Image (spheres, grey):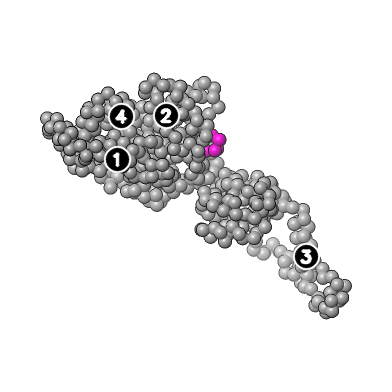
Amino acid sequence: MKDFAVFWGCTIPARFPFIEKSTRVVFDDLGANVRELAGFTCCPEGVLVKSSDEDAFYTTAARNLALVEQAGLDVVTPCNGCYSTFRETRAHLEVDWREKDRINERLAREGLHYSGRVKITHFAEWLADDLGAAVLASKMKKSFWGMRIAVHYGCHLLRPTPSVSWDDPLEPKKVEELVAAMGARVVDYQTKMQCCGGALDRVGEREGSLSFARRKLQDLQNNEVDAMVVVCPSCFQQFDLNQAALQRAKEDINVPVLYLSELIALGMGHQPDELGLDMHRVSVQPFLDTWEDRQADRARLAAFFDVSLLNKCDSCQACKDDCPVCKVDPTFQPTDIIGDLVRGDLDGVLADGQLWKCLECYTCQEMCHSRIGMADTFRKLKELAMAAGSGPESVSAAYQTFLKTGVLGSPKEGARKKLGLEPLPEGGGEALARVLQRTEGDAR
């Protein structure tokens, strides 16, 4: 679907025009033909309108959808609340045909009619289902490789079912797949499915609202995320504006918050000032700085490793408990070492010495469903450690012996003679030394 009406809702144009800007940029870059329609009102919002007048709630929503139908279009909205209102209204009026008829009698006064045939799509749903993660990945000019990003879906993008049914209401994955397609490491966390709690502010429960924000933000901070990505302006308000309030109260919380289209637009090569990212209450500069660092780390690692496989390995961790060494020595966690690499700490990994506990038994490779394993990575790390002079002294000494003699141990001729074994032929250590001796013209 490339030709559709867009419904911005109230919150985005009124409070967060930078979300509108980035979303328009993404629509343009992805070739969407977005139509602007006159006459829209609030969707309307449920807590403030439906609880006061249910009839006004359904009538207003049906009127907005009737405007879209009149234009012969479908509708995409970047707001969870608007999306939920429209989907709930459609489901309700499909069942209650008497109310649908009453509403259409009123709409007829304005030359409108609501049939219920309009397709209602969320911006994230359009990206995931109509466009696809692979297409989005192909549009990236600058990968988010190495970035740790957490996703907050928001309740009304997923529920209530069956009115809303584009992803699993309790274990969603589609937005995370979009973020992963852009190269980021998606971080799972305990409070992922917790409501943002922003609606409490609307009914005068300020402290409760802040408690909801605090709990999730602290969880994310404990998981060392570089940013949180949201797909709802109300959720953005809760985690950006209310986080700023917590910061003003001297609370130690700092989690940059990005709307999904902002992340995509950055990856497509747009500049932060073009997108108005400086209008966020919580600075996104730490995220941008880390992103630049990860780009440099990626370039450095690419000289030695397939960085796409490193990222895939770090994101999977299915073999986390399969390493034989882990069962004996819990201090050795090979998946953590891969994670350190992805976060750019190659020097720390080489200096730490834990990598030498890898037995190169290839258990990880045989059990890896992607046939990646970590053994080859650890072998390369050992080479780099030796070149950096941070390998074990025993390895260095053995290697020097090998270079001089061509062997790592001399035959025990006395024991061999006792067993009736003939002396072995003379070894080729000196010849090997001449072969291995490098000159300036040798290729490295």
Mark sitting earlier along the chain (3/2) = 2
Question: In x, y percent, where is residue 219?
Answer: 52, 34
Earlier along the polypeptide chain: callout 4 or callout 3?
4
For label 3, the crowd category at 10 Å Cα-Cα, with few meaning under 14, some 14 to 19 and many 20 or more, is few
Circle 3 sits on which residue?
A: 408
Q: Which mark is residue 77?
A: none
User: Residue, x 55% and y 50% (percent of image)?
Assistant: 317
For the residues carrying marks 3 and 1, which lies nearer the camera in this image?
1
Residue 184 pos. (x, y %): 48, 45
CA distance for labels 3 and 2: 66 Å
Q: Which residue is mark 2?
A: 197
Is 131 on the left or on the right of 105, as rendered? right
Give percent across and percent down for residue 393: 77, 53
Q: Main secondary structure of the magenta part?
A: loop
Q: Which mark is residue 46?
A: 4
Q: Amino acid at mark 1?
A: Ser
Q: Is residue 18 left or right of residue 104?
A: right
In the picture, measured across the screen, residue 403 lies left or right of residue 14, that is right
CA–CA distance in space, label 4 to label 1: 15 Å
